[in-house]
Amino acid sequence: MVGPNPAVLTLPPTPIAEAAELSTSDLKQMATEIAKEHSLNTDHFLKVISCESNWDTQIQSAYITKDGTRENSWGLVQINLSAHPNVTKEQALNPRFALTWMAEQWSLDGASMWSCWTILQARGWSLSTP
């Protein structure tokens, strides 16, 4: 994923233990609130997250790169740490940080760095609220 890369967000962390206890419903509620705060289309935001990680906060991308290694994308919104060196793995695995970071990127017209967004955009989706 490449694209807009604003300064590192400073948010209160969601401890990893707490993140593991969040249900998919909790994560969807958090994602919905954050998407609304950024005036994004919540349905599209949620569907891209579902496509990217299936709501798994600790997942690493299964995509195998040309050099035979797994892509360095992590967490709920699959932040690529190689493309975004100002984001730490701990931050990528933090649901609140990751969701806010994704919303900020979308607000900066950076949704195309998510492969699932690119697929859905081809179906006519847009970033803004309907």
Image (spheres, rainbow, N blue to C red):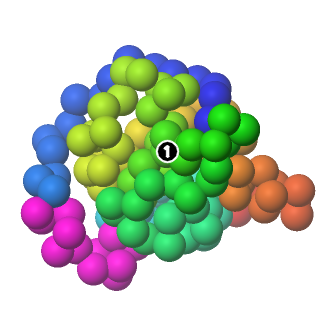
Q: In the image, 35: left or right of 13? A: right
Residue 6: horizontal and vertical position, in percent?
Answer: 46, 20
Q: Is residue 29 magenta?
A: no
Q: Amino acid at mark 1?
A: Ser
What residue is rendered at 88% in x and 56% in y?
A: 122
What residue is rendered at 24% in x and 41% in y?
A: 90
Label 1, residues with CA under 10 Å away: few <14, some 14-19, many ≥20: many
Q: Is residue 72 above or below residue 55?
A: above
Q: Quadrant of the N terminus?
A: top right
Res 38 visible: no
Res 53 visible: yes
Query: Disc 1 marks which residue?
Result: 73
Q: Residue furthest front?
A: 68
Residue 17: horizontal and vertical position, in percent?
Answer: 11, 63
Q: Which residues are magenta?
A: 17-28
In depth, the one of 76 and 107 nearer the eye is 76
Residue 36: horizontal and vertical position, in percent?
Answer: 46, 57
